[in-house]
Amino acid sequence: MLEIKNISKTFNPGTVNEKQALKGLALTLEDGDFVTVIGGNGAGKSTLLNAIAGTWKVDEGQILIDGLDVTRYPEHKRAAFLGRVFQDPMNGTAATMGIEENLALALRRGDKRTLKQGIGGAERKLYRDMLAKLGLGLENRLTSKVGLLSGGQRQALTLLMATLKKPKLLLLDEHTAALDPKTAAKVLETTENIVNQDHLTTLMITHNMKDAIHIGNRLIMMNNGRIIFDVKGEEKKKLTVEELLRKFAQASGEEFANDRMMLTN
Amino acid sequence: MDIMILINALPGAAAQGLIWGIMAIGVYITYRILDVADLTVDGSMCTGGAVFIMMMLNGSNVWVSMAAAFGAGMLSGLATGLFHTFMGIPAILSGILTQLGLWSVNLKIMGKANQAINVDKYDLLVSLRFIKNVPFYKNTILVVVLITVALILILYWFFGTELGCSLRATGCNDKMARAQGINTDFCRVLGLMISNGLVALSGSLLTQYQGFADINMGRGAIVIGLAAVIIGEAVFGKVFRNFGFKLLAVSFGSIIYYLVLQVVIWMGIDTDLLKLLSALVVAVFLAVPVWQERYFSKPVKKGGRS
């Protein structure tokens, strides 16, 4: 499904701010894998997702989606295969446009934008049905501007937009981190429902270790631009937070003091 | 101060306002929809006038000449767009570069700093002579109103299409737009082209109206355009919510600007000071939302809510 071959990325090379964010990272996802990604601050989690999404080009290595080499594809071209939800709820939607307009943009992800009407007549029913499933009462507010919605509503809408046209790979970058606990739980539940229903291959970054263990079929831990721990299936289900912390100390060879807070949440 | 002088001058002011209103709609597309302050307009206004007048003088049809002016404006927008996207130059600087370059281009098109055209010898669509004592269908105000309405209808349609929606998304949130597979660079270039096409079209109308094209005719156009956008929003913002009406409000804003200008001139202000006055008025209007946020928002509660 997704094949990442030894990608590296250095930001601000040759300056005092030089930061080697990815160091020859390799990762292969199977069809239908739901992978949670954990790691301390600056471990390279978001960098990994941005590398896949093509926010910038990697310095070396290769990225293949379904066997297709997308390493040189610009961001908007890769979007045809990807659904993305960002940490900041403001990032995933266009605030000055209506809910239905946002959804219509998402429905056409990967298609050529033509001079046909931006929202087809039959689409509104689809949007209403999909929004109703979110259970946020958005189904009756199709023409409301997205800027009027709460962070949680916007994030749920972004999730819907990311999956409205089934992506080959869903990238979730701490998409519940900016929400209050109750809303976060609701958005996470919606995420699981959608992913399970459509059997989406998913990479989800989270700071919550419990979520990382309970959700998905595979867990990877990153540190310092590399994957230091990769566990799946039965073995993953049996993990505990304490065990993960120990693994982290073991694999990274570093003291945990600073990262613990972030990891246990 | 004879009030009749003012009243006699108002129809002409309204006609000018309408013509500049088309330019202001172009500014609206970049400034409000694409979220870019595009200074190309100061040059492309004259480019439109220059292309139009040279084509007319060489015997072209008035409509063909206006279409060519529109096309020339689109090319200047393309130049700014490529400076900005392909060469990675900040948008505002890209516009300044094109504007400077267009100075030479405009001179080369016209061969000298200005060219005149006689409305009696050439079949022009609008003219300051067509304001009074002409059959109503030749009246410049009516003609420009019809052109404006037609343009607004076309733009209303376009910004409702898939392509138009992707342009709006690019201006609103380009990160989201790219995540949804929209080529934001292409959208920016296209938006700049449409905008400058409209500006040049307005330039071709202004050339007809005043009977000449001049190398300085677009100087400060961006300020007039912004003034029209801001006045339109301030006066009609609460009433006009539909996109088409918002464009109409820009045109109204431009008319108001020229009517007020006419009143100020009538009151006997030194006309040398007009540009300074315009700049200050626009500066203050741009500051109003910032001031509202900073000084007039709800006071912060001491202690907050527990």
Image: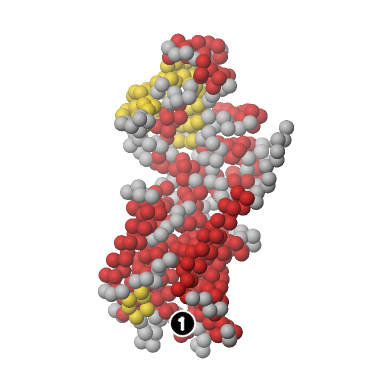
Colour theme? secondary structure
Host chain of mark 1: B
Q: Quadrant of residue B51?
A: bottom left
Q: Which residue is mark 1?
A: B128
Q: Position of residue A208 (x, y in %)?
A: 56, 22
A95 with respect to A114 (left or right): right
- Callout 1 crowding tier (Cα within 10 Å): few <14, some 14–19, many ≥20: many
Look at the image and tell me whether residue A87 can be seen: yes
Q: Which quarter of the rendered picture does the C terminus of chain B lie within? A: top right
Q: Residue furthest right?
A: B306
Reply above or below: B207 against A154: below
Residue A51 image point, x, y percent: 40, 32
- In depth, the one of A131 and A212 nearer the eye is A212
The amino acid at mark 1 is Leu
Measuring from the top left, give residue B261's x and y in whole percent.
53, 73
Depth check, front residue: B44 or A174: B44
Which residue is located at x 35 percent, y 68 percent?
B47
In the depicted structure, whether residue A2 falls above or below residue B293: above
Nearer to me, B143 or A252: A252
Q: Which residue appears at 57% of the width and 30% of the height?
A: A176
- Describe the element under mark 1 as helix, strand or loop: helix
Please tell me which residue is depicted at 43% across the width and 39% down the height of the picture. A79
Left or right placement of residue A1 versus residue B231 in this view: left
| Residue B103, quarter of picture | bottom left
Quadrant placement of the N terminus of chain B: bottom right
User: What residue lies at 58% left-to-right and 56% top-to-bottom?
Assistant: B288
The answer to whether A259 is drawn above or below residue A137 in the figure is above
Expressed as whole percent of the image width and height from the top left, the position of residue A112 reads 42, 48
Check the image and name the residue furthest to the bottom: B133
